Amino acid sequence: MSNPDRSSTPLNRRQFLGDSARNAATAAAGVVGLSHISQSRASAYSGDISKANTVRVGIIGLRNQGLELARVFQQTSGCEISAICDVDAAVRTRAGRELNLESSKVRSEEDANYLFDDPNLDALVIATPDHHHAWMSALAANAGKHLYLEIPTTHKAEEGERLQQMLSQTGVLVQVGLQHRSGQHYRSAMEYLHSEELGSTRYVKAWACVKRQKLISTEKTIPHPLSQHQQKLWLGPESTCELAGPDWHFQWRCLWPFGSGELGSWGVPLLDIARWGLQADMPNRVTATGGSYHLNDGRDTPDTLHVQYDFPEAAIVWEHRQWTSRGHEGRPHGVAFYGEKGTLIIDRSGWKVYDSKKSVGQPASKTLEPHVQNFVDAIRQQAPLAADFATGRVSSDYCHLGNRAFQSGEPISVNA
């Protein structure tokens, strides 16, 4: 397949993000070149794709979650994988082998721009490091591609409003990777909470103490596995930064230019469950404290963090510890809703109510498979999305607010 001419793409990542050296206020005005997107064009495209027999999907980012998503999309009714993309050729090769993809039928690229402009693709999965999420979503949506976007939806809070405005102009569908929103046991727990069986719930705690994290390497004598061109693609908007060779596939999560720490990984979905249960939008005030107490290896993000999100009549608290696997309530991760008539605790293994006259709960259900199927059905049959961009944006902003409060060392007041 010949490469399309990218010169026709009217919006580039620099236009969307603004100069990385600018401050947030200047960057917030960074979206230009969007007036050419007409509602008629977006609506017509959405109508055409909803009638497609098979949704042709491209996967961008093929390690860990990206590869798992590719496996699920491959097994989902009504779609097929038509393209894969990763800057690391070894990762692409492994994915092609594990997914048993025919190289003659599935496009393979190191540069995502070629997928944005491919007219043979209907939807894209963005499972890259955090710093690529917003600009890739903007360019893909501008090209008429529906999106399955992993969390956090953005790398910086100011990107969220700009991206949401742009998405509303294109008319594409965006499913955010909050897969628990499609899990039956999560949905039943929310129904129980919203029925007020627990009475008033004023305090919710979410936590992740999943495993002992490994130290990141700062050794730079080992040659980087990527070429200079591939490194430039990987760095993207953060082109002035440098990434050490040995742990580059892992350590980006711990560095502010690329990742959002544990709060951007486990925090977004678990805090989404917390605010879903409380039926809460944005908090009024956010405070945070913590530091790198045990993993003193040069990382930017804290290995220990406590964040409190205050509302007029309730509070949500987040805690993570990356140096121990012992969590609250005997669980390495989870969310606890403390109500007047009992405590509901939920995680991937199911949910259960404690300290109540009624013994209620439900075991685990599948989450990723129905979430992907919901996305495909939304494209083909106009089914409602389980986790649209607006939902994912708010929960991602919880992450950004918590990280900002930690970095500044000051409470943050949030304007309604």
Image (cartoon, helix red, strand yellow):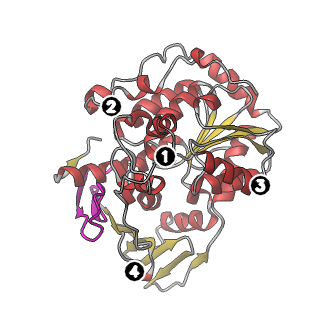
Q: Earlier in the sequence, mark 4 or mark 2?
A: 2
Tell me which corner region of the image, top left, top right, bottom left or bottom right, holds residue 320: bottom left
Helix, strand or loop at label 2? It is: loop
Q: Position of residue 106 (x, y in %)?
A: 76, 40
Residue picked out by circle 2: 20
71 relative position to 77: left or right: left
Q: CA separation, marks 3 and 1?
A: 26 Å
187 relative position to 212: left or right: right
Q: Nearer the viewer, residue 309 or 126?
A: 126
Q: Earlier in the sequence, mark 3 or mark 4?
A: 3
Query: On screen, 328 above or below 28?
Result: below
- Mark 4 or 2: in front is 2
Residue picked out by circle 1: 391
Query: On screen, 3 above or below 70?
Result: above
Q: Is residue 232 magenta?
A: no
Tell me which corner region of the image, top left, top right, bottom left or bottom right, holds residue 31: top left
Residue picked out by circle 3: 75
Q: Position of residue 92 (x, y in %)?
A: 65, 47
Q: Nearer the viewer, residue 121 or 160?
A: 121
365 relative position to 139: left or right: right
Q: CA separation, marks 2 and 3?
A: 39 Å
Q: Is residue 206 visible?
A: yes
Rendered-image quadrant of the N terminus: top right
Residue picked out by circle 4: 326
The residue type indicated by label 4 comes to Arg
Q: Are marks 4 and 1 in contact (CB under 8 Å)?
A: no
Q: Are marks 4 and 2 in contact (CB under 8 Å)?
A: no
